[in-house]
Amino acid sequence: MSKKDNSKELPEGSYRFFPDHVLTEVNIGIFFLYLCTILSIVFPLHLMEKANPLVTPEHIKPEWYFFPMYRWIKMTPQAVGIFVPGLVVLIFIFWPFIDRFIAKTTKSKNLATWIGVAGMVFVTALLVIEAMS
């Protein structure tokens, strides 16, 4: 039996992907990583003044999607501001049962829809009021 020779001759003008090409790319990547590290140490970037955790800014506003809840907490007493959102979450959880109860007692299919529309108008109004303040 003869041993197979694994070294094949490459066509002229070509080279192997591994290790020739891979090692070249790794070396270039390491060079640029080193260059970026050195530049960031020598020329540090300062975007704004450094944050001081002991000083609270004058006016803190939450992200826009928290505006309705933020306005609700500001315009109601503390107990109501905390209790009512929990009640709303419970209503969302039990809404299928509440919807069925409303449909049986009022014989109206649109009442639950109008309750939802009123809720959305209320939340949108809180959002707009807080955004404009």
Image: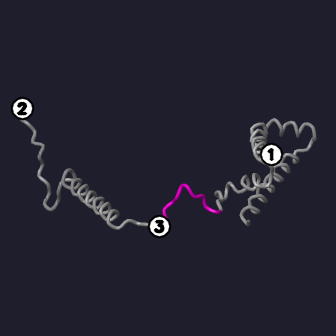
User: Which quarter shows the N terminus?
Assistant: top left
Q: Which residue lies furthest to the top in this view?
A: 1
Q: Is mark 3 on a helix, strand or loop?
A: loop
Q: Residue at x 47, y 67 (%)?
A: 47
Viewer-proximal residue, 119 or 48? 48
Say which residue label 3 marks. Answer: 47
User: Which residue is located at x 75 percent, y 44 percent?
Assistant: 82
Q: What percent of the width, then of the height, locates residue 85? A: 76, 45
Q: Tell me the quarter of the picture where residue 97 sits.
A: top right
Q: How far apart are marks 3 and 2 (CA)?
A: 72 Å
Q: Which of 26 and 77 is in front in this view?
A: 77
Is tag 1's residue or tag 3's residue first in the polypeptide sequence? 3
Residue 90 vertical position relative to residue 56 in the rendered view, above or below: above
Amino acid under label 3?
A: Leu
Q: Crowding near pointer 3: few (<14 within 10 Å), some, many (20+)? A: few
Q: In the rendered structure, which amino acid carries the disc numbered 2?
A: Met
Residue 113 placement, left or right of 131: right
As drawn, the residue found furthest toward the right would be 106
Q: Mark 2 points at which residue?
A: 1
Question: In whole angstroms, how far apart are the C-alphas of marks 1 and 3?
Answer: 41 Å
Total label count? 3
Residue drawn at point x = 21 percent, y = 54 percent: 23
